[in-house]
Image: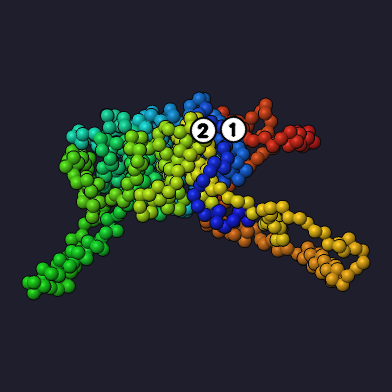
Amino acid sequence: MSAGRLMDVEDLVGLPERVEEQLSGAIASCLAFNRWGTLLAAGCLNGSVALYDYQTRGMASTLEGGHPDQTAVTALLWSGDGRTLLSGGHDGGCVVAWDVASGRVRQRLQLPSAGAISHLAWACSGRGHRQQQQGPEDEVLVSREGGPAVLLRQSDGHLQQLPMVCIDGDAKQPSSSSSGSNAAGTSGQVAITSHDGAIIYAGTRGAVMVLRRADLALLDVVKVGEGGTRILGLELNNSGRRLMVTAADHHIRIFLLHRPGDRQPLREQQRLARAMCSSAANGAWSSTTASQAKAQAPGDWRVRNMEEARRAVATTATLSRSRNSVFYDNDAAWLTGLLDFAHENARRQWKCAAFSPDGEYFASAFDGGGHVVYLWEAEAEARMNAVLEGQDTRDGVLALCWHPNSTPMQLLALGTLGSVYIWAKAFTENWSAFAPDFAELTSNNEYVEPEDEFDMNPHPQDEHLQQQMEQAESNQEDEEAEDVDIGTPGSRLEEVAGQLGILPDQQLPLLHVPLLLSQLSPTKPAVGVAGARVVHATVGAAAAAAAAAMAAAQ
């Protein structure tokens, strides 16, 4: 019986309300779901990565040997097909690519040390919540806490650092860097790409930079907060049109994303109207005037150099509070402020925030102060919807991660002590789903036994009922005797590919970790590339004995 039938329809819609379960078996430091939400990866403090089968909530396997012992895994990234998992550690020395099916290390990509790796993101198109990959998963954006983010190519290990423009607290000593060797690189940088892969948004100290992905050219710089606020996280909603910026202050900001082409028709209409008015006054209006007016529109890509950015940042103190960009007015900026969320307790700083799968809500948590999660509406107004309070006041919130499916909504909160809490909606089990005539009683009812219940004398109505039962059994036997068309393998693959949202000619994704009986021996763990070990979940003494018996028979 499926869980959906045991719940009322109203229970499938709504925000999380209570802690449904707490995952065990690992002390986690970061979380990441695969695209379908069937597998959950948890980076651990001891340098391993735990994989959970989310349907059973049990640990499926543990990936070991990729990172140095006792070095916390701080960032995770799944591939589009779920067969590869990237992980970065607190030492910041390398990015490890794992083969999820076998649990072995596929590749190690070395990095110059610049602090812990805080975030990993694909630098190709189609990386939204439910978007299909459109480009090869070769380049990765690696965000670091102690220097500029780097663009890492997996095929050859090539590195390219992102430029940095920081806005200091007094806005009089701006710093810009492209190498990360000076003070600008010490503040760290977090970077993500747009859903189409054409734009990179990079958060530095006091600013969000807009870069062109093709050549890392600077397009715009948007000021965030006051006093050189450090950017903690960037996230796009499912539509890719809104950017949520989490900073080390008491504000969470949502920006509306623009492209020059988005406002191009409006600019052309305004310019054409002005030309018509001017030409009509002079009596010289013609179609040539209209074409000349349209040709005056600005280009789609307006590149700025670092020196120009340095001069513009130096003048940010004189900017209007309603203006975000240091280069453009709000009618021409790449980012414009949309919503600003601030808690009434303005003395505390936010630690993390995450969009819900549908983008209508987001969850946030303060730095310290117990296990408390705030849920906000992110569509129209800055309004708090609910507050989730955990029982353990000592375990704060380190990170938040939503399950990719939005029905019912489930939110995973990673505690500062390494525990993983699953917040879900409280629902009422519908036990009448087991039998159509099942009735739930709210009070005790006295049962009155019919007088002829055990009477052996047949009644006409009993004979009619017996005939109906015999006819139903006969129909069931006929149905079982019929041949069942299970379809050809090709049609089945097309059906599965359609359900998973991939093309039929693509390789099917990995939804679950295979359990190999040959790797259940506790004395001989499987050894992979460069000594990496994979420890699979045991299935009990009976399964181990069966595996030994099979090996002896062979």
Find numbered disc 1 in the image and state the secondary structure of the residue it sits on. loop
**Side of 332 where 200 appears, left or right:** right
Circle 2/circle 1 CB separation < 8 Å: no
First in residue order: circle 2 vs circle 1 = 1
Can residue 502 be seen here? The reply is: no
Give me the residue at 18% from left, 67% from top: 272
Q: Which mark is residue 25?
A: 1
Give me the residue at 10% from left, 68% from top: 278
Q: Residue furthest top?
A: 70
Q: Position of residue 456 (x, y in %)?
A: 92, 63
- Quarter assignment of residue 465: bottom right
Find numbered disc 2 in the image and state the secondary structure of the residue it sits on. loop
Q: Quickly name the residue at label 2.
A: 392
Q: Residue furthest left?
A: 282
Other residues around mark 1 within 10 Å, as few (<14) / some (14–19) / many (≥20): few
Other residues around mark 2 within 10 Å, as few (<14) / some (14–19) / many (≥20): few
